[in-house]
Amino acid sequence: MRTFRNTDKAALRRRVAQGLRGFHRDDGGAIILLALAAVMILMMLAWVLWDAGKMGRHKLTVQAAADTAAYSQAAIKARAMNNLAYANIAKRSTVGIHSQYKALWESYKRWFALQVALCAAGDDSACQRVSDNQPILEAERENDFATFRDELGEQYYLQDLIAIDNYQRYTHALTPWWGWSEAVLRAARNGAGMAASFPAPQGTPKNAPILDSVTDQVMTQVGSTPLVKYTGHRDLLPVKISDYQYMLGTGMSQGLSFMGAEYEANNQLHKQNSEAGAASQAVIQGARNHFSSAVTGYSQSVFGEYGKPWKLFRTTNPAHWTSWTSNLVVTYRRKEELFDEMRQKYGPVPKDYHLDNEEMFRLSGYWGMARAEISFQDSSREPTLWHPRWTARMRPVALPGEFQQAGLQMSSIYHDMIPYLALSGIINTGDSGIVNDSIDDLVFMERANRALGQSTVEGIAK
C-alpha cells in the first residue's frame, strides 16, 4: 500500500489552498443567491394572494347564497299571498252568485206581494201583472228555487267553497316550511353548508337529540347571561280569517256589475213591452237592496266557516309589519384548508396571550346574512288580499330603530336560528358530524351577536 510522504501532503495542501483562493476570487453565479431570495418572496406573495383570493371567493359565495336564499324565501311567500288572493276572489264570486240568486228571488216575491196589494186596492194593471206572474212564481218556487235551495246550495256551491277554503288553510300552514326549505336548498346549491331564517317555522323534527342539544352546547361554552333569550316569533303569513261583512265591505255590494248587465239584458229583451221592462227593473233594483242581507244571512247560513275570506293583519306599529312580512337569512360554510392551517406559515411575532380553547375565539368558517320581504306592488290602493299584486324584494337587515320598535335583539334572533342551522347542515350533508365540526364557529357567532345592541345592529347592511 502506498503512503503519502510529507512532501506529497504539503503539495496537496498547496493545491487546495490555491483552489480555495481561486474560488473566493471568482464571483460567477452570485446572482443565484439573490434569485433564490426573490423566489422565496414571490412564493410568499403568491401564497398570500392565493389564500386571500380563496377566502374572498368563499365569502362572496356565502353572501350570494344568503342573498339567493332570502329572495327565494320571500318569493315563495309572495306567491302564497297571491294564491290566497286568487282564492279569495273565487270565494267572493261563489258567494256573490249564490247571494244574487237569493236576492233576486226575495225581490221578486216582494214585488209580487206589492202587486197583490195594489190589485186589492183596485189597480187593474196590477191585477193583470198578478195574473201573469202567479204561475211563474209558483213554477220558480217548485222548480228552480227548490233546486237552488236543496241541491245547488249545499251540494254544488258549498263543495266548491270547501275545496277553496281547504286550499287557503293548506297554503297558510305549509308556506313557512315551504319557504324555509326553498331557502335551505338555494343556499346549499350556492355553496353554503348551513342556512337558517328568522322568524323560524313552527316546530322542529321530533326525536332529534342533536338538534335539542346544540343550543345547550353553545350556551354551556359561552355562559348564560340575561341576553340569553328567545323571541318567541314564528314564521306565519300576515293573514287571518275574516267574516262575510268584510267581504261585503271590500267591493262586493258596490261592484255588482253582473246585476247591471242583467238589468240591461232585460231591458233589451222587453224593450217592446214597457210593463215587463218596468217589472224587471223593479225586481233587479230590489235585489240590489236585498243583496247584503242575502250575503250575511242566507249564504252565510249555508256556507258557514268555508265561505269566509282571509284578510291582512293590521297593526299600528310598522316594525311589527316588517317582522311579519320579511325573513332574515343567515348562511354558513365551513373553513376549507389554506396553504397552512390558520395562515401561520411566515413565522409571525410570538403571541403574548394563551387561551384554553383558542378555536372558540377565532372564526374559521364563513358567514353571510341577507334579508328580503314581500311587498304589495300597487300604489293606487292599500295592500289587500283581493288583488294578487304581491312580489319579493331585498331590503337592509335593520332599518333605524326597527329592532327596538319590534322588541327584538340580534342575540335572541340567533338563539332561535341555532337548531335550524344544525338541521339544515344535516339535511345538506347527510351527516350529523357537521354540527360538532362547526360548534366552535357557532360559539363564536353567539359571542359576536351578544355584542350587537340596538344601535350597532343598524350598521349591518347584509
Image: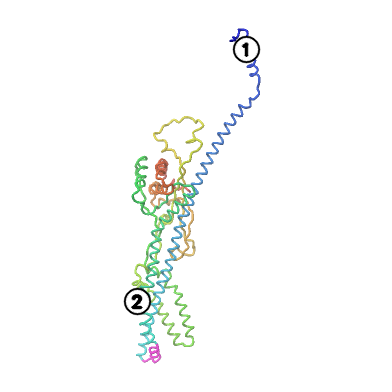
Quarter of the image where the N terminus is located: top right
Q: Is residue 199 left or right of residue 61?
A: left
Identify the residue under disc 1: 12
Identify the residue under disc 2: 150
Secondary structure under tag 1 reads helix
Question: Magenta residues?
Answer: 122-132
The percent coordinates of residue 275 (x first, y second) are 44, 87
Residue occupying the point 42% across, 66% down: 88
Report the amino acid beneath label 1. Answer: Leu
Q: Give the class, few, some or many, for how many residues have Cα within 10 Å of label 1's Cα (few <14, many ≥20).
A: few
Q: CA distance from mark 2 to mark 1?
A: 130 Å
Q: Residue furthest top?
A: 6
Magenta stretch containing residue 386, yes or no? no
Q: Nearer the viewer, residue 279 or 94?
A: 94
Residue occupying the point 40% across, 89% down: 132
Is any part of residue 227 visible from this angle?
Answer: no
Q: Give the class, few, some or many, for how many residues have Cα within 10 Å of label 2's Cα (few <14, many ≥20).
A: few
Q: Nearer the viewer, residue 127 or 161?
A: 161
Q: Nearer the viewer, residue 454 or 278?
A: 278
Residue 116 picture quarter: bottom left
The percent coordinates of residue 125 (x first, y second) are 40, 91
